[in-house]
Amino acid sequence: MDAIQQHMIDSYRAAQRGEVPPPLPGRHDWGVVREARDRRRFEAVIAGRPARGRRRAALRALLARSRGTGGSDAPGRSSTGPAGSR
């Protein structure tokens, strides 16, 4: 049984009992995502870590480390001049 079929059964049961029908499946999904994000930020603040920009800072550190060991050119680019001047 999928979510729509379960919703139809629950709606029928609620109508028989005179209750409010349940919300449609997926109606509150984005709210749950926002609450999870807010909870993660809250826990970061409580632990003394920055609440925002952690992924970007980690990527920046990773790129800086790879540039320091692998040279200054990006992969696939030549150091002879600007692109398209061949």
Image (cartoon, grey):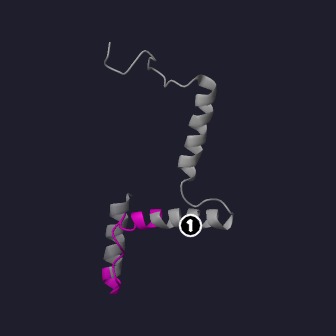
Q: Residue 3, percent across and down?
A: 37, 61
Q: Residue 85, percent across and down?
A: 32, 16
Q: Amino acid at mark 1?
A: Arg
Q: Which residues are magenta?
A: 15-33
The quadrant holding residue 63 is: top right
Above or below, comparing residue 49 to residue 80 in the picture: below
Q: Nearer the viewer, residue 33 or 17?
A: 33
Question: What residue is at 44 percent from the left and 20 percent from the top?
Answer: 77
User: Which quadrant is home to the C terminus?
Assistant: top left
Question: What residue is at 49 percent from the left and 25 percent from the top?
Answer: 74
Residue 36 magenta: no
Above or below, comparing residue 62 to residue 47 in the picture: above
Q: Residue 30, percent across and down?
A: 40, 63
Disc 1 secondary structure class: helix
- Give the residue pinned by disc 1: 39
Residue 16 magenta: yes
Q: Residue 44, percent across and down?
A: 63, 62
